[in-house]
Image (cartoon, grey):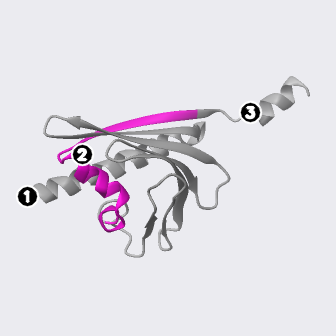
Amino acid sequence: MSDDNAEADFIEEEGVEVRAFIAGARADVWRHWVDVSLLETWWWPGFDDARYEVDAQPGGVYRIHTVSGGFGVAGVYEDVRPERRLEFSWHWSGQDVESEVSVDFADGDDGTIVTVSHEGIPFDDVEPITQGWEDVLTRLEERFDDLAD
């Protein structure tokens, strides 16, 4: 194989990390990630037809999709440490690329620090993936702000 072919087969992958402070106890923030009735209040609330399935255990599957939005994501939980860490695969509907996500939960001053790391992202998708995670975490922050009011 020539060097030209090796370059054609190579897809540069990147990772992103997004962090947010959530004004809620770690146990409550955790439940908002693993309980469907809570997840649907903040993940994609703008889509009335969004459907959520979560089986947060190693080997368990999650699916989040919306017909009106025209997209969805699914994957398998690889590591589940209650109130501490979630690791799962990430596969957008209709795409061939699968990546890996970890979500860490740590105690902060009067709240929880949530850190999302997303690895194995094609280089061209880094910016929209980063924006997506920032949007999701902002909605979670707002959810807890509303609960405090």
As shown in the figure, which amino acid type bears the numbered disc 1? Asp
Horizontal and vertical percent position of residue 17? 42, 35
Disc 1 residue crowd, few under 14, some 14–19, many 20+, Cα 10 Å: few
Q: Which numbered dot is residue 121?
A: none
Residue at 79%, 34% in the rendered image: 8
As shown in the figure, which amino acid type bears the numbered disc 3? Phe
Residue at 62%, 48% in the rendered image: 98
Residue at 31%, 46% in the rendered image: 83
Horizontal and vertical percent position of residue 97? 64, 49
- Secondary element type, mark 2: helix
| Residue that extends furthest to the right in the rendered view of this protein | 1
Q: Earlier in the sequence, mark 1 or mark 3?
A: 3
Pick the front one: 107 or 18: 107
Disc 3 residue crowd, few under 14, some 14–19, many 20+, Cα 10 Å: few
Horizontal and vertical percent position of residue 9? 79, 36
Q: CA distance from mark 2 to mark 1?
A: 19 Å
| Residue that extends furthest to the left in the rendered view of this protein | 149
> Left or right: 88 with respect to 49?
right
Q: Which residue is mark 1?
A: 149
Q: Nearer the viewer, mark 1 or mark 3?
A: 1
Q: Which residue is mark 3?
A: 10
| Quarter occupied by residue 107 | top left
Q: Which residue is mark 2?
A: 26
For residue 34, above or below residue 5? below
Q: CA distance from mark 2 to mark 3?
A: 40 Å
Quadrant in which the N terminus is drawn:
top right
Pick the front one: 124 or 56: 56
Q: Which residues are magenta?
A: 14-40
